[in-house]
Image (cartoon, rainbow, N blue to C red):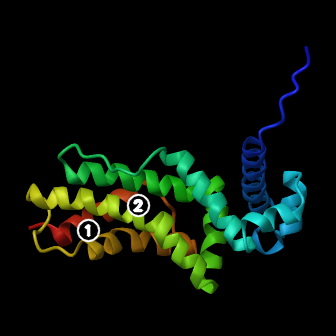
Amino acid sequence: MPDTRKPNPARRNERSRQAILAAARELISEMGYARVSIEAIAARAGVGKQTIYRWWPSKGAVIFDSFLDLSRDAEGQGVTLPDTGDIEADLKLVMRATVAEFADPRFEAPIRALNAEIINDPELAGQYREKLAGPVDDAKKARLRSAQQAGQLAADADLDLVLEVLYAPLYQRWLHRSGPLTAEYADALVEVTLKAFRP
């Protein structure tokens, strides 16, 4: 007996959404951000461009969601940092993973494209802070607070400043392509940061 059930629109919509996000990531890696268009994304995903505009207001918004989707896949549910009781070992593990991610071509092209858009789009910058950077920073600060309570960081350390000292050099090196992104570099950033903020 043939199956006469109607297709589930939610399932079909999610398939289309995933195809669009995957197409955006592929095209950025292949062509670079400037040459990617909504039309090209639609063609690669096998959808009409009106489908894309129904869910996203701009190319930048599609790029942001494609990166957010990739980050979710990499991190799984929720964001937590390891807590073995040794802040130096835990931060080195996290920073080595971050350096490897920034050097991974699957992440690098969308991250660069996203940064280019954030510079010129305050609304997108707000979404980035709310949906991605904010929750990740909150998880990092929770781990740093645990280190403060254990006496491994100064009790009066400004945790936002700790994160800036830890991550800003990595971000600058990546942004300007001014040096290699290695595990040794990640370890050095952790050591310098802890030296500055230990009790």
**Quadrant of the frame with the N terminus:** top right
On the image, the x and y values in percent for residue 139 come to 33, 58
Q: Residue at x 18, y 56 (%)?
A: 146
Of callouts 1 and 2, which one flags the residue occurring earlier in the amino acid sequence? 2
Which residue is painted at 53% across and 54% down in the image?
101
Q: Are marks 1 and 2 in contact (CB under 8 Å)?
A: no
Q: Camera-side residue: 124 or 14?
A: 14
Q: As drawn, is 150 to the left or to the right of 65? A: left
Q: Is residue 65 above or below residue 162?
A: above
Q: Which mark, by number, is residue 136?
A: 2
- Quadrant in the rendering for residue 23: bottom right
Q: Quadrant of residue 32?
A: bottom right
Distance of label 1 from label 2 (alpha carbons): 19 Å
Asked whether residue 25 appears in the rendered view, the answer is yes
Given the image, on which type of amino acid does mark 2 rest?
Val
Looking at the rendered structure, which numbered label has been put on residue 193? 1
**Quadrant for the C terminus in the image:** bottom left
How many marks can you see? 2
Q: How far across and how far down the image is residue 50, in percent?
A: 86, 65
| Percent x, y of residue 159 | 24, 71
Left or right, 86 with reference to 11: left
Note whether residue 188 is visible: no
